[in-house]
Amino acid sequence: MYRIAEGSLTLASEWRDQSINVLLPKDAGTQGTNLVIARDSLPLGMTFQDYVIQQRQNFSAQLAGCEMIADTAGRIDEREAHFLELRWRSDGKPIHQVMAMVLHEASAVLNFTGSIPGEADDETRNLLIAAIKSFTFAP
């Protein structure tokens, strides 16, 4: 049984979930704000810390004008997590992002990315951070 917000599927064999969820807050102070939840797997032999380092390097190399604002280890629902906050430019326009990478199982990672187009207002930024930190894993 595979569940999504709207219902569930019965799958005849084992499938790997690589889905991406995109959530748009109705109350955000900035139009275009979103929260994306993506699933990833650690490559064979890679630790979670190695994964965080690789992601950080990818952001710096791939995002124009990437500026790291915060880079902190932490926990979400008692699981190892790493939080990043950064600014970068897309087509010359500023993007502000708050992120969390959470080790789900031995090699599964959940990535949370909250994006605010333009300059981040504190209310919208705090809304995204609160949503990410509120995540709890299913039993």
Image: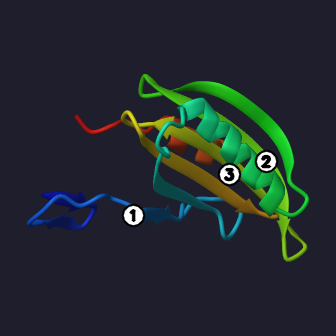
Percent of width and height locating residue 122: 75, 45
Up the image or down, 106 lies above or below 65; here it is: above
Packing grade of label 1 (10 A; few <14, some 14-19, many >=20) is few
Taking depth in this image into account, of 116 and 68 the one nearest to the observer is: 68
**Amino acid on which disc 3 is placed:** Thr
Distance in Å between CA atoms under marks 2 and 1: 24 Å
Distance in Å between CA atoms under marks 3 and 1: 25 Å
> What residue is drawn where x is 68% and y is 51%?
124
> What residue is drawn where x is 67% and y is 58%?
115
Percent of width and height locating residue 93: 87, 71
Packing grade of label 2 (10 A; few <14, some 14-19, many >=20) is some
Q: Are marks 2 and 3 in contact (CB under 8 Å)?
A: no
Q: Which mark is residue 131?
A: none
35 lies left or right of 52: left
74 lies left or right of 31: left
Distance in Å between CA atoms under marks 2 and 3: 15 Å
Residue marked by disc 3: 124
123 lies left or right of 138: right
Up the image or down, 97 lies above or below 138; here it is: below
Q: How many numbered dots are placed on residues in this image?
A: 3
Q: Are marks 2 and 1 in contact (CB under 8 Å)?
A: no
Q: Which mark is residue 19?
A: 1
Taking depth in this image into account, of 18 and 123 the one nearest to the observer is: 18
Residue 122 makes an appearance in the image:
no
**Amino acid on which disc 2 is placed:** Leu
Up the image or down, 126 lies above or below 32; here it is: above
Residue marked by disc 2: 86
Name the residue furthest bottom: 91
> What residue is drawn where x is 65% and y is 63%?
33
